[in-house]
Image: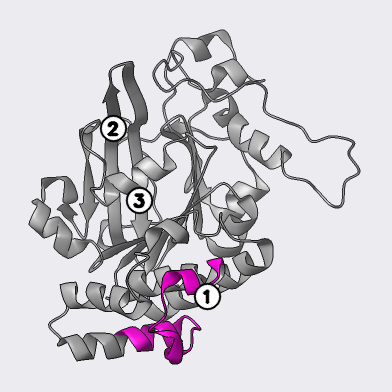
Amino acid sequence: MTEIQGKFNPESALLLDVRDLTIQYVTDNGTVHAVENLNLQLGRGETLGVVGETGAGKTTTALGIMRLIPSPPGVVRAGEILFEGEDLLKKSEPEMRAIRGGKIAMIFQDPMTSLNPVMTVDRQIAEMISLHRSVSDSEALTLAGDMLELVGIKRERMHDYPHQFSGGMKQRVVIAIALACDPGLLIADEPTTALDVTIQAQVLELMKKLKQQFNASMILITHDLGIVADICDHVAIMYAGRVVEYAEKRALYSRPLHPYTIGLFNSVPDLDEDREELAVIPGLMPDPMDLPTGCTFHPRCTFAAEECSKKKPDVLEVEPGHFVACPIRAGLGLGKPATGGERK
């Protein structure tokens, strides 16, 4: 079993521990290998950034944690999802309904489709509160108004419908719903993708402030390395369903090791450097129905050797808390297989 291990996160400090998670979508055309042997950990009060291209498996990982993988065609083939020490994959659906919203909440990337168009926003927030707290309907509506004010929306607008709000205001309503029952874990799936740049900054600042206020842990799924630098404590780089590099934010930005991570950084414009064109990663993401043998990144990798196409790389620890699934790049440090001992 390949594991990402480390010394900064003792078991007692863990909120979430995902072990060897494998999720597939079985279709008439073949099996989609969406997530393969994924390992992730999240400490209490931490923010983890999950970064990768479209199709890397980021959203499937989040839906797997929430137990919202559509079945069929989705199937969780293997693994454990330990939340507060208990495996979510062994929970019954009624137990999961109590956990969703109550202990784990998710902010989806498109607020326009996350809200019910025929219900006023206060009733949508109140519905979440009523599901997880023993309060009367009038108390739930009062708390809904409080939550709207908390995210910067005036109470007098609580009886408005979603179509009466801008995109940024809709996302604030979605955040209010997610935080209404004070969850321990907040999963944000590209929460600013549908917003313009100015509103993105406002929403991210709001999320940062509320996360601290509610003392929640957060998984932020994004493809924007700038957002990760601003918000996250640790970063997991995903490619073709696997975590290929994991590190504390400062370590990753100062010394990226995996060729894919390096390619992501090189593709970001640098205002201090005069370039005629950006460096790009050659090729395309592999077909998830037909993943390459060995390292799934080797067909696009400038560092690839013959062995890369034959053997799936182990996750190696090159320095405390910095892990990379590339033996060639790990050779730049004191890499050792991340197995046994403490987990990441």
Residue corresponding to mark 2: 22
Toward the front, the furthest residue is 118
**Residue type pointed to by label 2:** Thr
| Residue 3 shows in this picture | no
Q: Which mark is residue 241?
A: none
**Figure quadrant of residue 328:** top right
Element assignment for label 1: helix
| Residue 108 rendering spot, x and y as whole percentages | 41, 56
Q: Nearer the viewer, residue 170 or 34?
A: 170
**Relative to 86, does residue 278 appear above or below in the rendering?**
above
Task: Name the residue located 50 percent from the left edge and 83 percent from the top edge.
Answer: 152
In the image, is residue 155 part of the stretch drawn in magenta?
yes
Instruction: Find residue 83 and report its horizontal and vertical position in percent.
Output: 23, 56
Q: Which residue is mark 3?
A: 41
Q: Nearer the viewer, mark 3 or mark 1?
A: 1
Q: Relative to 18, is 106 above or below?
A: below
Give the magenta-colored segment's residue range: 144-167
In three-dimensional space, the C-alpha distance between marks 1 and 2, rounded to whole angstroms, equals 33 Å
- On the image, the x and y values in percent for residue 214 come to 37, 78
Residue at left offset 39%, top offset 19%: 289
Left or right, 325 with respect to 82, comes to: right
Kindly identify which residue carries mark 1.
206
List x then y, in percent, for residue 278. Answer: 79, 36
At mark 3, the secondary structure is strand
C-alpha separation, residue under disc 3 versus residue under disc 2: 16 Å
Is residue 65 located in the magenta-colored stretch of the structure?
no
Relative placement, left or right, of 11 versus 147 is left
Amino acid type of the residue tagged 1 in the rendering: Leu
Question: Neighbour class for label 2 at 10 Å: few (<14), some, many (≥20)?
Answer: many
Mark 1 neighbour density, 10 Å: few (under 14) some (14–19) many (20 or more): some
- Nearer the N terminus, badge 3 or badge 2? 2
